[in-house]
Image (cartoon, rainbow, N blue to C red):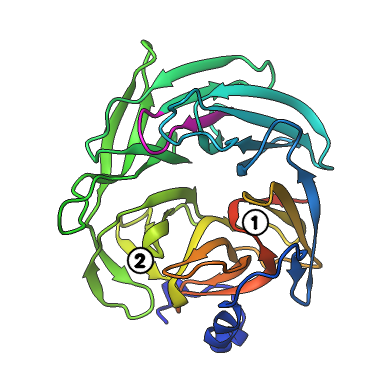
Amino acid sequence: MHPRFASAVPTALAGASLALAALLAPAPANAAPVAAPGYTVSVFAKSPQGSTRPDSIAVVGNRIWVGYGNGGDPTGANGAKSTLVEYSFGGKIVRTMTIVGHNDGMRLDPFTRQIWALQNEDGNSTLVIIDPVSGAREHYRFPPGHHGGGYDDVAFRNGIAYVSASNPTLDAAGRSHGPSLVSVTPLPDHAIAVTPVLGAAPRAIDTATGQSETLNLTDPDSTILTPAGDLLMDSQGDGELVRIAQASGQVYVTHLLGGVQVDDTAYATARHGFLLVSDKPGNVIYRINAATWAPGTAYSAMSGVSGTQSIAGYVGQLDFGSGALVPIVSGLDAGAGMVFVPAP
């Protein structure tokens, strides 16, 4: 492994393929999640009455915000409405608000201290910017995407908002020709200016082999900023994580082993704290604790395995060098949104 990709992942990951193979079995009905040695898992919150399918999670000061999509159409059709719920760190509801459209991505802008909530990831996308103190909201609408779809998730770097261009229209050969990642600027007239950042077929270096290849990003999804300041985007259906280095602009790709597909990824940023993960079909948000976390270690929420049905979802520790996602908590219905919450 090139030193650039070295991480805090233990050497025990050499046997990762065996651990992954053991997971390729139907999930037991009504089974509670099980934590690996060194971790514990508990319920942080269950979906409040009238809300279902929790997804994105954001830390806002000493509060946790969760977006509930409520099973709405991802194009916003048929009157889709979502619920944003503000929780205390103890999982108690502080405030709720209703958002028109199907919420998917949600992050705190660290520069303005406002929340960005994105709706309708498959088309007709909108953005609501929320003042978390007053609850005041500003509504914006994206122009039609050149990739043919919508916009999913946002990450902020150096005052710029980067958004994944989701649900692209594919040609007869199954290839996308639009951007996969864009930068966006809300305008005074409540429109949004969109600038392409990364195409759907970029050249990338494989983190396992060090070889260069051309990608075909058919399912851009969750987007985060790594502790090193790189942009990390999940192409969910492709089973790939794409990283754009801040310093060089070089693109790297990690192909996940075993056909694993993931939704969100979170990094431990402190030795003490906890992970939150939303189990969308299970309508539960789980809290994962460890005696000590290794800062800089990445964890992803497994949402499925390509070509396989009825596989138990899990949260795994990610090895960028091999593409292994080794379970730390298994037995979810399907992992979705994630966030690491450092101890105060």
Say if the magenta span includes residue 124.
yes
Q: Which residue is mark 2?
A: 253
Is 289 located above or below residue 318 in the figure?
A: above
User: x%, y% of residue 75?
Assistant: 40, 32
Q: Is residue 227 visible?
A: no
User: x%, y% of residue 65?
Assistant: 67, 36
The three-letter amino acid code for the residue at tag 1 is: Thr
> Which label is found at residue 168?
none
Of badges 2 and 1, the one in the foreground is 2
Closer-to-camera residue (99/282): 282
Closer-to-camera residue (79/261): 79
Query: Do the CB atoms of the residues marked 2 and 1 lie less than 8 Å apart?
Result: no
In the image, 155: left or right of 18?
A: left
Q: Earlier in the sequence, mark 2 or mark 1?
A: 2
Residue that protrudes farthest toward the left in the picture: 172
Closer-to-camera residue (215/219): 219
Q: Is residue 72 visible?
A: yes
Question: What span is in magenta?
Answer: 114-125
User: Residue shown at 28%/44% (left/top)?
Assistant: 197
Q: Which class describes the residues within 10 Å of circle 2: few (<14), some (14-19), or many (20+)?
A: many
Q: Which residue is mark 1?
A: 269
Q: Which class describes the residues within 10 Å of circle 1: few (<14), some (14-19), or many (20+)?
A: some
User: x%, y% of residue 256?
Assistant: 44, 71
The three-letter amino acid code for the residue at tag 2 is: Val
Say if the magenta span includes residue 205.
no
